Amino acid sequence: MAPQETVILRMRSVSMRYAAGSEVLHDIDLLLKAGSFHFLVGPSGAGKTSLLRVIALTVPVSRGTITLFGRDAVALGEAERARLRRRIGVVFQDFRLLGHLSVFDNVALPLRINRVPEAVVARRVTELLDWIGLRDRTRLPPPRLSVGERQLVTIARAVITRPDLLLADEPLSNLDNRRAERLMHLFVELHRRGTTVLLATHDKGLLEHHRFPILEMDSGRLRSGSLIGPLAAAG
Amino acid sequence: MTGPEMSELELDLPLAEQGTGRFLQWILAAATCLAVLAAALAVLADAELRRAAMRPMVVTLALPAGTAAAEVEAVVRFLGRTEGVAFADPVSEEELAQLVEPWLGDLGEESPLAIPRLIDVTFDPGFRADLRELEARLRELVPGTTFDRTAVEPPETGMLRNLRLFALIAAVAFVSSGVVATAAVVRAGLRAQTDTVDLLRLMGAVDRYLEGQLVDHVLRCGLRGAVAGFATAGMLILAGIEIGGRFDIRPFDALVLRPVDWLLLTAVPILLVLLATLAARLAIDRSLARAA
Ligand SMILES: Nc1ncnc2c1ncn2[C@@H]1O[C@H](COP(=O)(O)OP(=O)(O)O)[C@@H](O)[C@H]1O
Ligand SMILES: [Mg+2]
């Protein structure tokens, strides 16, 4: 990560509507500093997933500006957008695993897209799957796994590249406490090593155990008073 | 490393697992096999035509009835000096009588002068004379001289030429259908995979990466199919030559494929795979551009 990138993400007055639908995000101002860790909370339908999608550049905004890794993310060419996306790991709420590939190949996907040598891919994927506890599942296709195991695969795929920015959408919701705790340690460890983390959750216990700043969403708005004000002023 | 299945699994887009990969392989194997068979037929017909072309041309020259022996002599001498003529052989009167007997009956005391004098003209092997010009020059010597042109070209030649043409057209048609089918299969496979394409793009895959994967895949399927198709065609050709050689199969005198002919035949699968890959690349480009 380049040292001068103190701000990873800056959103100004961003609104978003899904195709032909009504607006689901209103006037979002958000600033994420490099190496920060934030929880994103809010009731179901508040817009957490939508906000993460906007940041991951998967849906276009209808208003406002986004600066991501120092680039204007609203007007990007294909190659540039692809390059930014490769620095982002996303844990999708709906997993989005490829059913025709094995667990191993699903997790290897981001590395291969980054053209990492196959020997390195094999080592890193095996290592991570071992650590996560999926050692005996590597050859299976995701549809043969339990929901919790699929969630683990999704997380592994999101972190395998050690991304600069990790967007995790309810990443622990399908895991038992022991596993959830272990995976939370993984996120914290990544954060310690410099990854900027934005983690959407509705798990109150998580917020109590890990004292990271909280961004609160409601009805498509980031609630004022939730840490953004001072950060925005600082940036 | 994780074993030989690795390379298979490297493909992120599930064409192979969808069955389209196997389908593609079969299509290309069939197209290759049929195209090679057709091409082999064309090559065999061509070889036969070349052999026929090297056979010395023999035409019969007819001098009008009543031509004097001296004039016949003069014509023979003239032909002897003519380029490409191996020898000119006047048909003797006895032979002539025997020739015409089945039609005219025994000539008996009827004047042999009533029938034309014939000269068999044999040209050098491979030499194709301009009979029209030669005829014109001979007419200056003996007015009314004609060539019996029906004998110049055996009926097989025309048949072989048609066979060669149709076989070539068939080969081209089989190659083209293989190529078109490849493009169609790839396009359909990709259309069924928009979710996967979206996900890969979302992870930062550029279209070149997606295209590279798919083209690799088509190339691999194509090569497998082409090898299988060529092997099948090769065995069928060898069997056909072996069996055909035992019978008299009309337009052909001999069924022989030289090593250079086999080399030529290998160009068919190579061409097919190259064109199929190219078509796949174009189809992929267009599909991805539309899905962007
Ligand atoms: N793909 C979509 N198309 C249209 N509307 C959507 C889509 N996804 C979510 N929404 C709507 O956007 C709003 C916010 O949803 P979402 O971002 O999923 O909230 P959360 O993740 O906080 O539960 C909801 O009203 C939801 O119905
Ligand atoms: Mg959600």
Image: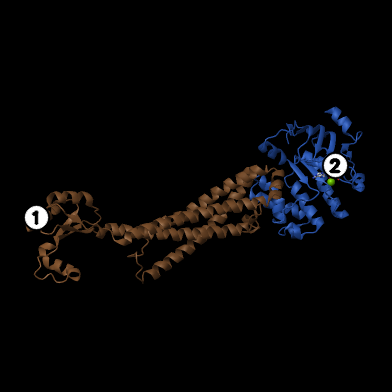
Chain colours: A blue, B brown
Q: CA distance from mark 1 to mark 2?
A: 112 Å
- On the picture, is B61 further left or further right than B186? left
Rendered residue at 78%/36% (across/down): A61
- Residue B144 lies, in percent from the top left, at 16, 53
Residue at numbered disc 1: B71
| Mark 1 residue crowding within 10 angstroms, few (<14) / some (14–19) / many (20+) | few
Q: Amino acid at mark 2?
A: Gly
> Which quadrant holds residue B146?
bottom left
Task: Between residue A154 and residue B226, name the one nearer to us.
Answer: B226
Q: Is residue A39 shown above or below B109?
A: above
Helix, strand or loop at mark 1: helix
| Mark 2 residue crowding within 10 angstroms, few (<14) / some (14–19) / many (20+) | many
Tell me the number on the disc at residue A47.
2
- On the picture, is B200 further left or further right than B56? right
Q: Amino acid at mark 1?
A: Glu
Disc 1 + disc 2, Cβ < 8 Å:
no
Helix, strand or loop at mark 2: loop
Residue A192 appearing in the image: no
Task: Between residue B145 and residue A98, name the one nearer to us.
Answer: B145
On what subunit does the disc labeled 1 rest? Answer: B
